[in-house]
Structure formats: structure tokens, C-alpha cells
Image: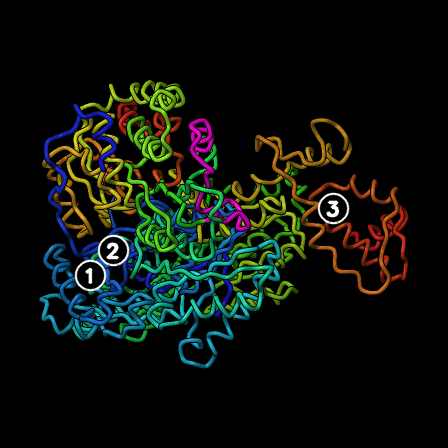
């Protein structure tokens, strides 16, 4: 089902359901899944993330996102040492000791994630069993779960996917007599969550639950009457786990900009049989504000070309947004992983002939980028300054993860993120 | 297994990257999974470099582990050589690749590339960043210089060179704390006393430059954590003595000049100090009286911590209340200096332990790294940076060395800046309830009020009552609140200890002032 197409049939481009994809295999200039902890530990306020890994993991965490601003973050690393590897220490005993030490220091923690890393995966440390064992020891005060954020298995946002997927088996069973409920999956800033909740309430769509919850005690129920909407495009495993619990995905594009948000809300409203005129009434002011806010930047961005390096898997829906709502042209849309099913509605809206690339060989991609000479490049922090020094204009992709960009009220902010680098370039006279 | 919140040093391969990124014409092929590329942003973002570090990551994935990760490495090394055409290739493994034991060195040498391949084994589960940098620099120097040793020594024995004595400056890397400016300062210092600098390494050199290191008369080790091991090898191989004094602070800079002159055989040494160095006069200026005996806590890498301790004591008139380092390799030097100062050195890389130590000491100023800045913020204690690890704002646009006479001037400004000025401090003591000079007021030149976290800090400081429980009566509690917040934790702790020692259970205003008299310095 293509919601956008149904919404605005006249805008439907001709036959690009299966655009060609350039698959690349080489050096990837991306973060590993551990990085998701940077926002997840702020989102779930009584959860703690204990990475079982190396000094590299700890160093990544403190360097990746300037998280040193937090005096006492809710994450730490249990650094594996030589004696653990040499078998001089029993790794499981060591882990129990570290977890006990941690929980004594942080008694407010109710949910502890043991997060697997490249080294813990390579030495086949069974953290899943360790989590069971520790849960047995610390329940009911602390629940202990495991997921892997290792770079050999996960790219950047896939860490959130793995974390949420690990939560799903622990979600309470939705009782059968309460009827249909909506589950919104994917970490959203609290303010965005509240906006969506108000809209769903006004539409009469509900009850609405969010995954992840703000506190570990508020795990949303799930069952065969659960309809779920993805708020983020990178939740492959979470979606599968939810479906194993009986939930059904509502196919929709992702809620970016006025069009994406409207189509996303409408997909849910249709399931609930919301009257179209009521839908229009409820969403009208939001739509108008989004169109107005985005319009301001559309003038400046229209016709500008953009090149996405792979980063968060948000690239396809964001490309849809900048192309269809800001009239920018797409030079290349790189993504670490292309989930054709979840992205079907956004892919269908991309212009014909767009170059999609999956995976990365960074040196070759830099060659393509320099040859294309786009007006703006969306890329990671490792590439941005070198490209700026080459005369390119860049937007750090990580900011798209750390800034509220979903929904009507953020549509203008999202557009501004793409406009700001050009604005800055225009102002500077040095 | 060790619980770690923040880490002072990265893994050793980041140290290797600091060497490779500092140089030109060298490429580092690192066997590593995706995600390890985060290290690029240390250089492109924190240090604002305009080029990507010259590093190729093999980016193996879980599905490769059962297959041929060695082949992946060989392909990456071959491609990197073809694309970047380096003069030499550095090869090694990150922590994960170390576990799969593919032997990058052997694999790369088997490729038959037409350039030198320098393999480095950096045990990630034992060692850290500075050690990795030092080891990498040593292996590069040794690997690239060994071939020319005989020829260089023969030329040296043929007769002394004409002209001024020459030396190499060893140690400055990418991502170092003020290395860029230290080099410039030391270059101008050496030029002033008539010494030529043959090669600065590793910053800005190529592998082929490195092969000529042996030609200089002697070496200067600016950062022992990075370059001492290489300098020792050069001393053995090329009979080059090396200068050990690190010129941070006025006195150390004078000693550095003396040592350089002695090693270089210059006599007499021209005076290069006139008009340049202001620290001595600023420190003698009477407005600086308020600095007298301020209790400072110092933590950093060994070189910067020791230098700061000496400057604090001899050139600022501070009292060094605590001194420590995360550089275990240089712990002995720090212990020795601390013991000269009558204190015990703190040797740890555990951020939480440093925090406890600071909380116990209640210093009036912290000189440290970005970690200590963090602790200082929590405790409401003024803080200045003296060492890596550092953040983006510690890579200033302006010229701000730590070394040499200008470095001493920079240090003066940097350390005094976070402090309350003398008269201001008095006013604060006099008019405690004034709306402006109130308790939590920050130094007036620092803008908005720093949040004083004294209560929290003092709670943590107060030892758990052993024996009889001490009670502060209302009057005493009120009086305590009039003590400036930055020393209040200490006043509370001292008073309680004083009362406990005398078996008093209730603390009165009298007890408070008795304790003050007892402990007054």
C-alpha cells in the first residue's frame, strides 16, 4: 500500500518502485551500534547501559558525541583486560563483580542493559546468559537485558534497533478485551512524542503507547490487537520481534515534513476508520504551520543538489523530504542498509533515476562526491571538515539524530538544518 | 575487567594514529571493524584538521569472521598503497583484530609493495594511547633509520660539520596538547641561542626525512611520553645525546637553555629572556599576594603534571595539595616529585578515584585535563587545563604555547583567569548577604554565576561518623554558611574532625573558631 501515492495521486512519479541500488563493500566511515546509547540513555531515564568491551569502546563513547557534558552519564564500559582474555580471571565472575559495584553506586537504576561489543562478540562471551543470571540475582529491583551494539554486526542506529528488539520479549501481553491499540516504535524526543500523542488523541486513535518508554516501569503492552507504526526507519529487528508478539505494522512513509507526517498519521487514522473530514480538521493547523515553515526554506533550497553519505538509515526518508518538499535534487542517497519493505512508501516517492547506494567504500564514494560537486553534502563528523576544506558545504548527519525533526512542528527545523550550512557560507567573508 | 566511566587515554592504535596523522607521506592500514573509524573525528573535529587521517580501516564484519579476514586485509593494504602512494606503510590491528590474530605485519610484507612496511604490535588489552604513540614512533625511527646508520656514522667520523650545532626536536604529534605552538616557541628559543633544528618529528615530517635523523648532533625530547624510547635508540645508534629538561615554566626553560648549551657546546649563551618573560614580575606584583599558598590539585600526563607542580610551587607561590598522573609508564618521576613536596602521588587512570581524591582534598584550584574540568564544575572549584585529554576549545586559534618564556606567560594568564581576584575575594567575605557579593557569586570577570555545588561536595566529604554522632547547633550551622563556599567543605570537615578528636558531640560557634585556629595555616 502506498499511502503517499493515494494521498496525492498527481504527484506520483512514473514507475520507480525498484530503483537500482549500488551495493558497496569497503571501508565504512560510520559509527557502530554502541553510539545509540548516547540518546537512549537520555530517553529511558532509569536505564543504564554497560558496554562489555575494550578501551576503544569507552573512548568512542566519550569522543563520539561530546557526551562529556554529562557529569554522571547512565552508561559505562566494563573494559576487558589481558587477564580476562588469558583466562586468569573468570570473565563471568568479573562481570558479576562489576555489575554489583555499579548497582551499588547507582541504586536508582531499574533496567540494566549489558551491551555487547566487537571484542565481546569475537571472544564469544555469552552476555545473554549473563543477563539472565544477573536478572535472577537482582530482580525485582533491576531487570538485566542484553543486546549487541558491536561494529561487526551493527551500524550506528542499528544499536537502537537491537536495544528495542531486546525489550520486546519483556513487554507485557496486551489483554484481549481492551481492543485495538497503537504502538509507536522508535525513540523520539519527549516533545515530539507529546505532539504525536495529542494528535492521535484528537483523532480518536488509541490507546497509544511508545517504545521505548521514558521509564522502564512503563513498558507498553503488545499483542495481536496491536497495530504498530515505525517512527524510525532503522527498526528491522524490532519490527520482526513485535510481529512475533502478534503486532501488525501499519505501512506508512516516515513522518518528516508536512507530507510525510500527514501520510504517517493518515495510515493509522485509516486503520481506526477516522472520518476524512475529521482527519483534515485535526491535522489542518499542523499541516499549515509545517507548509509555512518549510516554505521559508524552500525558496533558498529549491534546485540545490544534495549528496547523502550513509549514516543513520534516515537517508531515504530525508531524501524524500528534501526532494519532494524542498525541491532539492538528489545526487546520491547512500544508506548503510536499505530495508525495501519499511521504506517502500518513501522509495516510491524518489525521482526516477536517483542513485541509491547501500554499504560503503568511502574512498570511492568521496571520488563520486567530488565529481558530482553537490551544493550540500550530508556526512559524518570524520568527513565534514576535510570536505569543507575542499570547498564543499556540509551538514553533519549526526545532528539529524540529535535534533527533534519528526512531525509538523519540527518540519521547519528540519528544513533549516539543510539551509544553515548554505546560509553560513553566504554570510562568511573570510 | 574494569568499570570505566571516562578514560584518560584511548587505545594504543589511537596513539599510532597520532603519529601517522602528524606525518606526511605515511599511510596506516589498520585491521579493524566498522565503528573504529570514530577515531577520525578526534582529528577532524577536536583538532579541526582539514584532512582525513591517513588511515585505511579494513572494516571486517561478523560474516567475514568465518571466512577470510586476512584476504580482506591484503586487499585493503594493496588498495591503500595504490590510492595514496605513501613513502612507507604502517600496519597493525585494533583491539578486535588483535583477537582474530591475522598478523597484519606478515600479510603486508608478503604483498611485496615497493615501499618500507613498518608493522606495529600494540597490545590493546594491556596498553594505552601514549604508549602506542611512543612504540609507533620508535618502530618508525628504527625501521627507517637503521639502514643509514653506517653511512651516517662514517660521515660523522670523517670530521665535524661546519656551522651551528644542530638537533632534532622529538615528540610533537597530532592531537597533542599545544604541540603546534610549543614547537614554534622552542624553535625560536633555539634559534636565539644559536642552535639549528635539523628535523622536527613526527610533526610534519615524511618517512624519508626520518631516515636522516641520525645526521643531527643531538636530540631534544619535548614529550618524553612519546619520544623518550626513540631518543634512547638514537643515542645508542648515532651517539646523539638527548636533552631531558622539558621547558615548561620560567625556571625549567632557563635550565633547558643551560642543558642545550652544554650538550651543544655553546659558550657563552646569549640572553634570550629580556622583555619576553612577564611571569616573574606578574607573580611579584603585589596584587598577586592573594595567590599565596592557594591549595592546588594537579593531574595530567606525567610531563605536564610534574612541570605544573613545579611552576605552581616556585613561580606562583601555591601549595601543591595533590599531584597525580594517568601515565603509569612515568609514575616513578611523579612519585619522586610528590615525595619531595611531602605528599603522596596519585597514580591512576580511574576518573572516579581522581574525583574522590579531589573531594577529599577540597583544593582551591584544579590544574588538570578535561576530566578534572568536569569534576571541578561539579564541585564549583576553579580549574585550568594543563594536559591532554583536551576538548575542541583547548585547541585555540591564537598562539598559546605551554613551553618557553611565552609559554610561561600563557600559563600565568590561564591559571589566574579562573580565580577570584584578591580584593573581590575579600569583599565576598565581608558582605556575605549582599545581593551581588553573595555566596555562590562567580568571579566578576567570568560572567554568569557558576553554580556552586558546595553542599553536594561537602556531603560527600563529610566522613561517615565513626563513634559518637556530631551535631551542629543552629548557630554554628549559620556561622558555617558565612564561610566562603569554596572552603566551606574543608571548614566543615576540619571542625568535625577537631570536635571528634576532643570527644565533643555538639558543634558550637566556639568549636568552629577553635578548629579554625587549630588548623589555620
Image location of residue B342, percent across then percent down: 66, 65
Visible in this render: residue A199? yes
Q: Residue at x 27, y 35 (%)?
A: A318
Magenta-highlighted residues = A196-221
Dots 2, 1 in contact, CB < 8 A: yes
Image mark 3: chain: B
- Name the disc covering residue B207, or none: 1
Q: Residue at x 26, y 23 (%)?
A: A426
Please determine if labels 2 and 3 lie on a single subunit. Answer: yes
Query: B79 and A396: which one is in front?
Result: A396
Q: Is residue A205 one of those drawn in magenta?
A: yes
In this rendering, would A388 be left or right of A369?
A: right
Image location of residue B68, percent across then percent down: 18, 71
Query: Residue at label 2?
Result: B23
In this rendering, would A57 be left or right of A131?
A: left
Q: Residues within 10 Å of mark 3 (few under 14, many from 20)?
A: some
Query: Residue at label 3?
Result: B488
For residue B166, above or below residue A260: below
Q: Residues within 10 Å of mark 1 (few under 14, many from 20)?
A: many
Q: CA distance from mark 2 to mark 3?
A: 50 Å
For residue B75, above or below residue A82: above
Q: Please identify the quadrant where the C terminus of chain A is shown.
A: top left
Image location of residue A129, percent across then percent down: 44, 70
Image location of residue B29, percent across then percent down: 21, 62
In this rendering, would B120 be left or right of A115?
A: left
Image mark 2: chain: B
Q: Residue at x 22, y 28 (%)?
A: A324
Quarter of the rendering containing residue B60: bottom left
Dots 3, 1 in contact, CB < 8 A: no
Image mark 1: chain: B
Amino acid at each position: 500500500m502506498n499511502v503517499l501515492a493515494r494521498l496525492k495521486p498527481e504527484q506520483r512519479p512514473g514507475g520507480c518502485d525498484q530503483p537500482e541500488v549500488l551495493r558497496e563493500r569497503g571501508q565504512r566511515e560510520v559509527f557502530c551500534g554502541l553510539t545509540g546509547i548516547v540518546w537512549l540513555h537520555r530517553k529511558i531515564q532509569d536505564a543504564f547501559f554497560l558496554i562489555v568491551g575494550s578501551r576503544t569502546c569507552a573512548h568512542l563513547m566519550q569522543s563520539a558525541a561530546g557526551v562529556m557534558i554529562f557529569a554522571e552519564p547512565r552508561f559505562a564500559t566494563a573494559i576487558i583486560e589481558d587477564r580476562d582474555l588469558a583466562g586468569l580471571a573468570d570473565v563471568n565472575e568479573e562481570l558479576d563483580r562489576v555489575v554489583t559495584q555499579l548497582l551499588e553506586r547507582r541504586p536508582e537504576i531499574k533496567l540494566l542493559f549489558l551491551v555487547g561489543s566487537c571484542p565481546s562478540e569475537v571472544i564469544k562471551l555469552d552476555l545473554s546468559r549473563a543477563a539472565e543470571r544477573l536478572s535472577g540475582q537482582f530482580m525485582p529491583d533491576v531487570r538485566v537485558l542484553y543486546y549487541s551494539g558491536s561494529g561487526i554486526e551493527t551500524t550506528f542506529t542499528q544499536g537502537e534497533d537491537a536495544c528495542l528488539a531486546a525489550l520486546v520479549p519483556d513487554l507485557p501481553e496486551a489483554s484481549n478485551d481492551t481492543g485495538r491499540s497503537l504502538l509507536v516504535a522508535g525513540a523520539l524526543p519527549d516533545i515530539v512524542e507529546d505532539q504525536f500523542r495529542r494528535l492521535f488523541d484528537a483523532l480518536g486513535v488509541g490507546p497509544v503507547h511508545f517504545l521505548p518508554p521514558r521509564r522502564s516501569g512503563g513498558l507498553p503492552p503488545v499483542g495481536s490487537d496491536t497495530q504498530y507504526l515505525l517512527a524510525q526507519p532503522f527498526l528491522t529487528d524490532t519490527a520482526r520481534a513485535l510481529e512475533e508478539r502478534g503486532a501488525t505494522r501499519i505501512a506508512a512513509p516516515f513522518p518528516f515534513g508536512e507530507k510525510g507526517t500527514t501520510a504517517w498519521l493518515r495510515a493509522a487514522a485509516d486503520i481506526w476508520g477516522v472520518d476524512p473530514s475529521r482527519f483534515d480538521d485535526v491535522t489542518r493547523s499542523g499541516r499549515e504551520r509545517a507548509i509555512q515553515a518549510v516554505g521559508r526554506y524552500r525558496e533558498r533550497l529549491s534546485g540545490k543538489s544534495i549528496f547523502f553519505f550513509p549514516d543513520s538509515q534516515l537517508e531515504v526518508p530525508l531524501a524524500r523530504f528534501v526532494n519532494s518538499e524542498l525541491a532539492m535534487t538528489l545526487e546520491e542517497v547512500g544508506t548503510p542498509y536499505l530495508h525495501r519493505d519499511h521504506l517502500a512508501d518513501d522509495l516510491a516517492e524518489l525521482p526516477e533515476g536517483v542513485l541509491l547506494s547501500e554499504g560503503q567504500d568511502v574512498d570511492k564514494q568521496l571520488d563520486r562526491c567530488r565529481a558530482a560537486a553537490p551544493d550540500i553534502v550530508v556526512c559524518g563528523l570524520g568527513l565534514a571538515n576535510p570536505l569543507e576544506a575542499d570547498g564543499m558545504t556540509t551538514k553533519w548527519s549526526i545532528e539529524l539524530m540529535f535534533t527533534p525533526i519528526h512531525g509538523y512542528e519540527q518540519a521547519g527545523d528540519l528544513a533549516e538544518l539543510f539551509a544553515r550550512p548554505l546560509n553560513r557560507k553566504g554570510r562568511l567573508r573570510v | 575487567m574494569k568499570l570505566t566511566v571516562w578514560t584518560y587515554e584511548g587505545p594504543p592504535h589511537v596513539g599510532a594514529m597520532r603519529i601517522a596523522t602528524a606525518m606526511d607521506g605515511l599511510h596506516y592500514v589498520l585491521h579493524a571493524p566498522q565503528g573504529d573509524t570514530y577515531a577520525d573525528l578526534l582529528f577532524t573535529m577536536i583538532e579541526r584538521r582539514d584532512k582525513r587521517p591517513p588511515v585505511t580501516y579494513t572494516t571486517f564484519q561478523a560474516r567475514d569472521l568465518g571466512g577470510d579476514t586476512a584476504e580482506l586485509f591484503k586487499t585493503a593494504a594493496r588498495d591503500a598503497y595504490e590510492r595514496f602512494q605513501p613513502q612507507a606503510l604502517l600496519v597493525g590491528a585494533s583491539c578486535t583484530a588483535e583477537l582474530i590474530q591475522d598478523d597484519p605485519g606478515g600479510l603486508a610484507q608478503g604483498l611485496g609493495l615497493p615501499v618500507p612496511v613498518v608493522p606495529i604490535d600494540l597490545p590493546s588489552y594491556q596498553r594505552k594511547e601514549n604508549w602506542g604513540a611512543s612504540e609507533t614512533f620508535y618502530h618508525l625511527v628504527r625501521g627507517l633509520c637503521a639502514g643509514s646508520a653506517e653511512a651516517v656514522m662514517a660521515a660523522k667520523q670523517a670530521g665535524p660539520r661546519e656551522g651551528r650545532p644542530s638537533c632534532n626536536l622529538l615528540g610533537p604529534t597530532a592531537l597533542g596538547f599545544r604541540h603546534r605552538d610549543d614547537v614554534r616557541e622552542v624553535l625560536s628559543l633555539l634559534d636565539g641561542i644559536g642552535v639549528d633544528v635539523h628535523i622536527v618529528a613526527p610533526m610534519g615530517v615524511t618517512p624519508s626525512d626520518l631516515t636522516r635523523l641520525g645526521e643531527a648532533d643531538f636530540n631534544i625530547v619535548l614529550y618524553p611520553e612519546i619520544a623518550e624510547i626513540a631518543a634512547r635508540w638514537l643515542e645508542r645508534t648515532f651517539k646523539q645525546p638527548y636533552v631531558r629538561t622539558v621547558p615548561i615554566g620560567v625556571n625549567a626553560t632557563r635550565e633547558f637553555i643551560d642543558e642545550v648549551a652544554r650538550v651543544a657546546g655553546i659558550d657563552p649563551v646569549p640572553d634570550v629572556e629580556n622583555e619576553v618573560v612577564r611571569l616573574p614580575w606578574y607573580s611579584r606584583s603585589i596584587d598577586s599576594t592573594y595567590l599565596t599558598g592557594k591549595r592546588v590539585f594537579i593531574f595530567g600526563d606525567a610531563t605536564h603534571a610534574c612541570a605544573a607542580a613545579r611552576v605552581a610551587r616556585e613561580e606562583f607561590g601555591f601549595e601543591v595539595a595533590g599531584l597525580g598522573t594517568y601515565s603509569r609508564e612515568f609514575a616513578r618521576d611523579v612519585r619522586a616529585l610528590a615525595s619531595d613536596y611531602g605528599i603522596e602521588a596519585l597514580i591512576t587512570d580511574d576518573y572516579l578515584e581522581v574525583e574522590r581524591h579531589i573531594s577529599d582534598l577540597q583544593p582551591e584550584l584544579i590544574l588538570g585535563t578535561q576530566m578534572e574540568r568536569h569534576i571541578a564544575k561539579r564541585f564549583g572549584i576553579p580549574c585550568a587545563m594543563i594536559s591532554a585529554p583536551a576538548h575542541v576549545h583547548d585547541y585555540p586559534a591564537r598562539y598559546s604555547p605551554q613551553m618557553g618564556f611565552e609559554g610561561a606567560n600563557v600559563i600565568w594568564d590561564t591559571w589566574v583567569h579562573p580565580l577570584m581576584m584578591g580584593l573581590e575575594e575579600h569583599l565576598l567575605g565581608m558582605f556575605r548577604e549582599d545581593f551581588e557579593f553573595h555566596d555562590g557569586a562567580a568571579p566578576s570577570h567570568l560572567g554568569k554565576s557558576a553554580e556552586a555545588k558546595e553542599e553536594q561536595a561537602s556531603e560527600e566529604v563529610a566522613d561517615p561518623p565513626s563513634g559518637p554522632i556530631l551535631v551542629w547547633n543552629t548557630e554554628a550551622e549559620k556561622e558555617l554558611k558565612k564561610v566562603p563556599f569554596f572552603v566551606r567543605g574543608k571548614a566543615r570537615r576540619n571542625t568535625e574532625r577537631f570536635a571528634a578528636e576532643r570527644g565533643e558531640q555538639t558543634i558550637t560557634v566556639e568549636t568552629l573558631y577553635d578548629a579554625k585556629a587549630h588548623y589555620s595555616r
